[in-house]
Amino acid sequence: MLRLVTAWNNLQSSLWFIPGLLMLGAILLAMLTIEIDNRIDHEWLARFPRLFGAGAEGSRSMLNSIATSMITVAALVFSITVSALSQASTQYTPRILRSFMSDRANQFVLGTFSGIFAFCLIVLRTVRGDDDGNAFIPGVSVVVAFVLAIVGVGVLIYFIHHVAVSLQAGTVVSRAAEDIIKAICHVFPERSESKAQKLEENTDRQSGCGTDVQAARVGYIQSVDAQKLVDLARNLQARLECLVDAGDFVNSSSVVVRIFSPKPAKASDIQKVQACFVCESHRTVEQDPRFGVRQIVDIALKALSPAVADPTMATMCVQYLTAVLVVAAERGDPSGTIWHDGKLRLVRKVATFEDLLRLSFDEIARASEGNFVVSRVMVLSLREIACAARETERESLVARYERAWVTRLSGDLAAADRRHLLSTRSSASNRQQ
């Protein structure tokens, strides 16, 4: 099931799937309208000459013009999309290309123009004049093609607006933050559930002979089917230790799981364990929120580089990372153990709130040394995260990070900026209290 879900997600994020469905729908629509033209009373159509009165030559000319213009615009849309992908990769980070490719608006626009082109081609081949014998003029189909052409013009205007908006820094960062928050809500449990799981971890772990399971292919772990691993461990009366998590890179010699069971694992069991891991050439955010955080951090680091020197964009990245960490602080850490019937069945590697915190701010803190604007925003952000983690050990964790970072960040600031930064920290602490 996990592989089917992953394959479906990869299919939806491709540039051809939605356009292919729309083109298929346009072909079916063309066949339907042609069948309507074949069955309808043409004397009834003659009552509306200005709407259905085009002759064979006029219908051919209109359909040919619409088809030619639509395929030309489709090529233009594809060129604009490729140009936007190249610009986004250069301006922000190559890791956001997948989100642009999976943009439903871009896929819908490509599919609309390709579908109108296919519709006109199918209708065009059915037009027959008196000279051809057995004349047939699909009046309804021609009118539908004209309406679709008008719709295509509107879609083109929308596409130009959408590309202009989607390339803005705020749109790129906010979209990445939304994906991270969805992944956190999926991976990180509610705080009450996390506490209940931690109580169970005091049970003794069972022992047994260990069998290493190596990765089936080279690439990044996209997803791990933990429930299936638990079921396999229960059937084998074993304990599995998962040594990798979503987002980790593995090769043919990497050990992904170690099986502890009374008897050595069979080759068929090893294959079943390997099937619980989806490994591809790229990372995704669905089970790997760290990858989404990595995208925003890369944008911030590029903005702080001497070549770009855009502290406003870096500040925006810090603020969106704060929104992500606030959500993570309000939830519990994923459990590193899964039990079944009072027995430990799976020990797994998981990403924690501290991992996200370090990944979000460590590199930005080093890159922003001497930059008062970004430093001040980071102090305020850490205070906000600490407020969200109130009455938990995470509050003290964030406070320690804040003290260490303020000391390090203020070292390279001017005297006035240093005093302002320290006063900002004091004011933020007083507001929290």
Image (cartoon, helix red, strand yellow):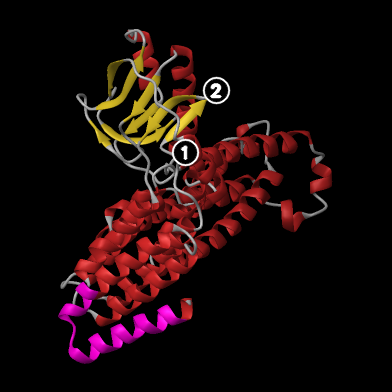
Single out the residue that lies furthest toward the bottom: 416
Disc 1 is placed on an element classified as: helix
Amino acid found under the numbered disc labelled 2: Asp
Local crowd size for mark 2, using a 10 Å CA cut-off: few (<14), some (14–19), many (≥20): few
Q: Residue at x 83, y 44 (%)?
A: 43
In this image, 58 relative to 89: left or right?
A: right
Vertical side of 263 occupied by 142: above or below: below
Residue 428 percent across, percent down from the top left: 41, 80
Depth check: 344 or 32 in front?
344
- The three-letter amino acid code for the residue at tag 1 is Asn
Question: Is residue 394 in view from this perspective?
Answer: yes
- Residue at image point 39% right, 56% down: 76
Q: Give yes or no for contact between labels 2 and 1 (Cβ–Cβ under 8 Å).
A: no
> Residue 101: where, in percent of width, then height?
40, 49
Circle 2 or circle 1, nearest the eye: 2
Asked whether residue 402 is drawn in magenta, I would say no
Residue that numbered label 1 is attached to: 9
In the rendered view, would you say 286 is above or below 51? above
Q: Residue at x 32, y 77 (%)?
A: 312
Q: Circle 2 is placed at which residue position?
A: 341
Q: Which numbered disc, 2 or 1, marks the residue that appears first in the sequence? A: 1
Provide residue 72's location: percent of width, then percent of height.
42, 53
Residue 82 is labelled as none
- Region of the chain picked out in magenta, as a range: 407-430
Q: CA–CA distance between discs 2 and 1? A: 34 Å
Secondary structure of the residue carrying numbered label 2:
loop
